[in-house]
Image (spheres, rainbow, N blue to C red):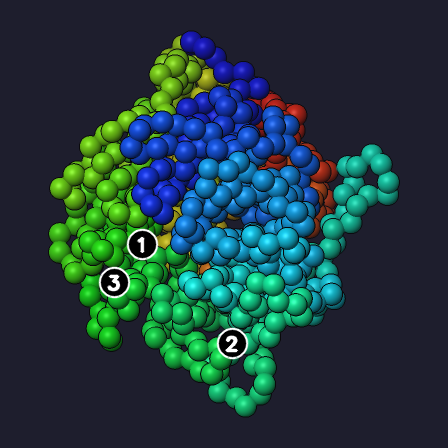
Amino acid sequence: MTNPLTIQEVAKYPRPGTEGPRRFEFTPDNTSLLYLDSPPGSLVQQLWAYDLASGQRSQLSEIGGPHPAPLSREEELRRERTRTRELGITDFQVAPQAEALTILVSLGGWLYLKQGENHFRKLDGTEGALNARLSPDGQRVAFVRQNNLYVLELSGEAGPQALTADTEAGITNGLAEYIAQEEMHRLEGFWWSPDSRRIAFERVDNRHIPVYTILHQGQSAGTGEIEEHRYPFTGEANDKVELGVIYLPEPGADNALPATYWVNLNLRRSGAERPAPLEDGYLARVAWQPEGHLIAQLESRNQQNLKLVTYDPEEGSFQVMLEEQNQPWINLHDLTYHLKSGETLLGSERTGFRHLYLLNNGETRTLTSGDWLVTGVNRVDEQNRAVYFTATKDTPLERHLYRVSLDGGEIVRLTGEAGWHITEVSPDGNWVVDRFSSLENPVTVTLNRVTNVRTLEKVVTLYEDSSVSPAALGLKPPELVNFPAEDGTLLYGAIYHPDNDAAVAKPFPLIVSVYGGPGAQRVQNAWDLTVDMRAQYLAQQGFIVFKVDNRGSAARGLAFEGVLYKRFGEVELQDQITGVKYLTDQGLADPARVGIFGWSYGGYMTLIALLKAPEIFKVGVAGAPVTFFEAYDTHYTERYLSTPQSNPEGYRLTSVLPLVENLEGKLFLVHGLVDENVHFRNSAALIERLAEENKRFDLLVFPEERHMPRKPANLIYLEQRVTDYFKENL
């Protein structure tokens, strides 16, 4: 065995070979590329620029330091929603219409602004600002503080002006509600109009939702901090959401609150001065059309209907542009763009695979089609009538950049190397930055010129670390395999083979690494799969580790995902068992020594495997599992299971609690006590049932960790305990 991993390396972030520039954005004038980067081995990011003409790189931000300021509770929770581990500058805003380059960043609870050649300066009066956004013209910045929306004139001396004035706990203005952030992947709660004169914002009222209390019991001082969350449990009430539009006062006007025009989200014409909040559904997306109309995507509560609605807030009128219905559910996305031409680029799964369509005066043009799906739109180049997009066209195991005309026609693949490409296209369509990796290749970042609208010509390598390779790290990239499920559906898997000189002969003890739930894809031709350090470490200890993207996983089309509708823990388990049989039939895995581990939905799957198939799975490590889905939120759970009221049998059969009497193997349960996503009540209910059935198990709690453990000492301790558990019991 060469270069065996240490447990410290297993627990360390960032992973080797995953560093380098990220969060790319070309400047509006197409002269520079902006990006975030951090020193080697560090998570603390700063803002950099690459000049496209001279090739010079410069660090634009010199704020903060190697030890970032403590995070506020609000910022801590925001990072949980985005699964952000990076520190320092984690995002930046550019004003697209400003005369000089205008950039806004948030750091240490303050906002900093850079205009033209000037250095970043701290903006007075912005302490505690959340979700700050520059106006398109760069003259103002809006942000949320203490649950109200504020605007600050950047050229004047006056402080921030309040645009809303709610003071009662349970009401927020300009902040996306919990399920919008966690499940709808919408972080924004307000939106600037293209003319910089108006702000649309959502007002959220959750006073009617019971408080869910989380107590910090790992703090040595005081009596323990208490967090209060208004968490919408499945089948129960959602937040009451309103959408308002504020016309901003002219600079220098008095500080009186401006008038708010309220949008009719229920689509029922009424003479009421203020429309009622959204009653039974979700405000999924909000945007402004180039000509100035407000547009919203409204999703029904059962998530099988989506309306695209335009509003004239002053007149109180609305028009339904498009209505889509889909079974078993509609997957929300960010592939809808409203063009200056009046056309709309739309992403839709109407065929069972997400594709691009162009809507124009009631006519629909299909731009992409086939048994593959579009995963993202990188750039809409209206001047040259082209759209650049990322898709699974060649294989679901990779991501490539493609181009197609808005008038239809040939689809051209631009990226070449087999693997995973994360790209950004310049506004003029002439440049592409490509963050590339594969199983064999760590991250490299290149800047490329688009030639003949068909190929990419590399201009410069912005990042490459030649010292990092699988051999240098002592890692063996996993082997990608495929095999049929019981119904013949092709499944993809990844095998981490034990080290050649491991002191164990075939067949090897097997550990299944599982997620298994909807919305995720784990088997990819990407470096992240190679630097799954837990899997690599276990392989070095003599285990064979296996991952399978079972039916129900993402990136394979709606029919592949939809097999989970109204029932969890059945088809997923069948496919994981088929994966185990695939390895045992080849003589690689010992059928008498099979373990499984997973986190979140993977923790749930670990429990399902131990309790439904104890003859196969002997040892399991379940991290932060949902144990009964009545304890999870509305938008996620009801998309797949409907409500407990309409599908009681599905919820009963999905729960692990009635199955506890079946436990025969060894169970190691891990959970953070301040997990605000999958509450510890899930594990607590399971512990109660385990005691009732007199079933032995092992438990590890982290009193001050949330859903994703972060503290270095806790990560090291966790990895050592997991490894030891499998060694002792397999």
Q: Nearer the viewer, residue 340 or 232?
A: 340
Image point (13%, 56%), residue name: 409
- Earlier along the polypeptide chain: callout 3 or callout 1? 3
Q: Nearer the viewer, mark 1 or mark 2?
A: 2
Image point (19%, 43%), residue name: 413
How crowded pointer 3 is (Cα within 10 Å; few <14, some 14-19, many 20+) is rated as: many
Q: Secondary structure at mark 1?
A: loop
- Please name the amino acid that badge 3 sits on: Tyr
Spatial CA distance of label 2 from label 3 is: 28 Å
Above or below, comparing residue 84 to residue 146 in the picture: above
Judging by the rendered image, the residue that carries numbered circle 2 is 263
Q: Nearer the viewer, residue 187 or 596?
A: 187
Spatial CA distance of label 3 from label 1 is: 17 Å
Q: x%, y% of residue 671? A: 65, 40
Q: x%, y% of residue 391? A: 28, 47
Q: Which mark is residue 700?
A: none
How crowded pointer 2 is (Cα within 10 Å; few <14, some 14-19, many 20+) is rated as: many
Judging by the rendered image, the residue that carries numbered circle 3 is 357
Residue 71 shows up from this direction: yes
Q: Nearer the viewer, mark 2 or mark 3?
A: 2
Q: x%, y% of residue 152? A: 60, 56
Image point (61%, 32%), residue name: 64
Q: Which mark is residue 557?
A: 1
Q: x%, y% of residue 257? A: 65, 70
- Earlier along the polypeptide chain: callout 2 or callout 3? 2
Q: Nearer the viewer, residue 49 or 581?
A: 49
Residue extending farthest to the right is: 222
Spatial CA distance of label 1 from label 2 is: 34 Å
Horizontal side of 99 relative to 436 (left or right) equals: right
Horizontal side of 405 relative to 138 (left or right) equals: left
Quadrant of the image for the N terminus? top left
- Earlier along the polypeptide chain: callout 1 or callout 2? 2
